[in-house]
């Protein structure tokens, strides 16, 4: 049998482009596999930032209500298997290989990208496992993302920010129009931020979707003991602190709750269940705090809005000593904007080279930092950068690892987690 790693290498060579934002090819294969109309409800979540946390909250709430949930996320932190899970358990190598073999048999001469293979594999495995719900995280954009071949029963867009501008356009309006492509006529369209581009609202109106808007139809706020959530006339007070840290996570939890209520999937929702599910939700790499002699904070922030959110969280948690950043960023990101958001918070920079075709080396990254940035090291691997940070840090300092999924995953491995 061909191994999972062999399959993944093969997929990267099948289609001439790593990203190809069209739906015709993947939809044709899905049709051949009878995956276009899943036998279970589908919840799709998109947006620039926050979607990973939101799908985790949705899956946790559904599981707490007793449902069997298929969850599709991207990218993974370490193992490809993390992309597809059923009832909280990642797909095995054997399950993934079997799904890829079925896709290969169905596609014929149609070429598919790496992400299209993973999307079809998720839909295939969810159908075979007879899940009660499928929760899909959009990979890139929305309108032309492979997850959009199925019609979501309810969809949410968490936020709109400047990212992937080469593919989605260089304005919030163009990006918003693409992200809003996951909404469907006569179905709920949940907006996880009060301020959204006009194009998002225009799309909702044009197709006749039902807008459910943060700050208008639902709301949430942090309290001294946790947070409270409102949806219409319904109010849940005294909910405990979330399992995910950071101020923006209250919005994500509220968006998850609103998505289930708007979709009519809240039959068993009650205070105790919500409290337990949201307090126990943990997603690695989202302002993840690791207590060592020096504190370590890991965050996948990889665009300017996410970097600004990370900066806010760091400023709310001032250390006694220095903040040492271990940073690796892909070459197609707005390095200047990401660094600018964090420059007032970081005392020393350690720059690393990430793996992958879109990576830039540490020296090239250093050239994009402002002249006054205190760069104390440039390293060829994440592990060597983390080791250097550990050697510099003393009690009272903190080490912040950020810039990409491709830095947080190896950092977790280096930390032995």
Image (cartoon, rainbow, N blue to C red):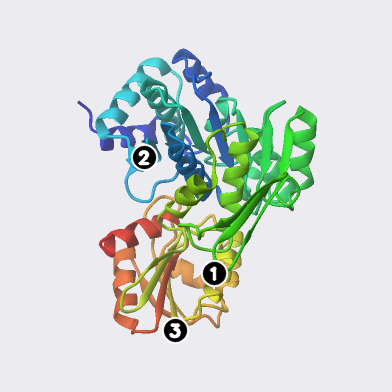
Quarter of the rendering containing residue 198: top right
Q: Earlier in the sequence, mark 1 or mark 2?
A: 2
Q: Is residue 111 above or below residue 235?
A: above
Query: What numbered label is drawn on residue 342?
Result: none
Residue plotted at (51% across, 17% down): 28
Name the residue that disc number 3 marks.
322
Instruction: Label 3, secondary structure: give it.
Output: loop
Q: Quadrant of the N terminus?
A: top left
C-alpha distance separating marks 3 and 2: 38 Å
Asked if marks 3 and 1 touch (Cβ < 8 Å), the reply is no
* Residue 405 x/y as whole percent: 43, 54
Instruction: Label 2, secondary structure: give it.
Output: loop
Q: Earlier in the sequence, mark 3 or mark 1?
A: 1
Query: What numbered label is drawn on residue 313?
Result: 1
C-alpha distance separating marks 1 and 2: 28 Å
* Residue 11 x/y as whole percent: 37, 32
User: Is residue 188 shown left or right of residue 274?
Assistant: right
User: Is residue 14 shown left or right of residue 20?
Assistant: left
C-alpha distance separating marks 3 and 1: 16 Å
* Residue 83 x/y as whole percent: 39, 40
Q: Is residue 261 above or below residue 186?
A: below
Quarter of the rendering containing residue 94: top left
* Residue 161 x/y as whole percent: 65, 53
Q: Residues within 10 Å of mark 3 (few under 14, many from 20)?
A: some
Q: Quadrant of the C terminus?
A: bottom left
Name the residue that disc number 2 marks.
88
Circle 1 or circle 2, nearest the eye: 2
């Amino acid at each position: 049998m061909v191994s999972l790693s062999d399959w993944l290498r093969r997929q990267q060579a099948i289609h001439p482009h790593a990203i190809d934002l069209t739906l015709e090819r993947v939809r044709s294969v899905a049709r051949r596999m009878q995956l276009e109309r899943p036998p279970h409800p589908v919840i799709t979540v998109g947006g620039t930032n926050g979607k990973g946390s939101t799908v985790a909250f949705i899956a946790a709430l559904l599981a707490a209500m007793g449902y069997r949930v298929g969850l599709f996320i991207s990218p993974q932190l370490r193992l490809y298997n993390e992309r597809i899970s059923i009832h909280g358990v990642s797909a095995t190598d054997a399950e993934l290989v079997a799904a890829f073999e079925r896709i290969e048999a169905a596609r014929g001469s149609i070429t598919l990208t790496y992400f299209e293979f993973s999307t079809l594999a998720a839909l295939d495995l969810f159908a075979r496992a007879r899940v009660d719900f499928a929760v899909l995280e959009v990979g890139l954009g929305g309108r032309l993302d492979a997850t959009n071949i199925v019609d979501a029963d309810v969809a949410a867009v968490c936020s709109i920010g400047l990212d992937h501008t080469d593919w989605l356009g260089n304005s919030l309006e163009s990006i918003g129009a693409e992200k809003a492509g996951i909404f469907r006529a006569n179905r709920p369209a949940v907006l996880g931020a009060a301020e959204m581009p006009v194009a998002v609202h225009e799309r909702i109106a044009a197709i006749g979707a039902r807008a459910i808007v943060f700050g208008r139809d639902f709301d949430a706020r942090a309290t001294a003991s946790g947070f409270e959530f409102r949806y219409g006339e319904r109010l849940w007070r005294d909910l405990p602190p979330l399992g995910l840290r950071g101020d923006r996570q209250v919005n994500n939890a509220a968006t998850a709750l609103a998505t289930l209520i708007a979709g009519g999937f809240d039959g068993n929702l009650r205070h105790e269940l919500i409290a337990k599910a949201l307090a126990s939700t943990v997603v690695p790499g989202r302002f993840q705090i690791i207590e060592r002699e020096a504190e370590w904070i890991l965050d996948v922030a990889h665009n300017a809005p996410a970097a600004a959110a990370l900066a806010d969280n760091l400023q709310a948690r001032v250390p006694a000593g220095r903040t040492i950043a271990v940073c690796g960023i892909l070459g197609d990101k707005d390095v200047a904007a990401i660094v600018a958001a964090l420059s007032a918070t970081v005392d020393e920079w350690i720059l690393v080279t990430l793996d992958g075709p879109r990576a830039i080396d540490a020296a090239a990254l250093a050239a994009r930092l402002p002249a006054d940035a205190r760069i104390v090291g440039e390293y060829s691997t994440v592990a060597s950068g983390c080791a250097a940070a550990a050697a510099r840090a003393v009690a009272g300092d903190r080490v912040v690892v950020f810039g990409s999924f491709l830095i947080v995953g190896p950092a977790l491995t280096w930390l032995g987690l």
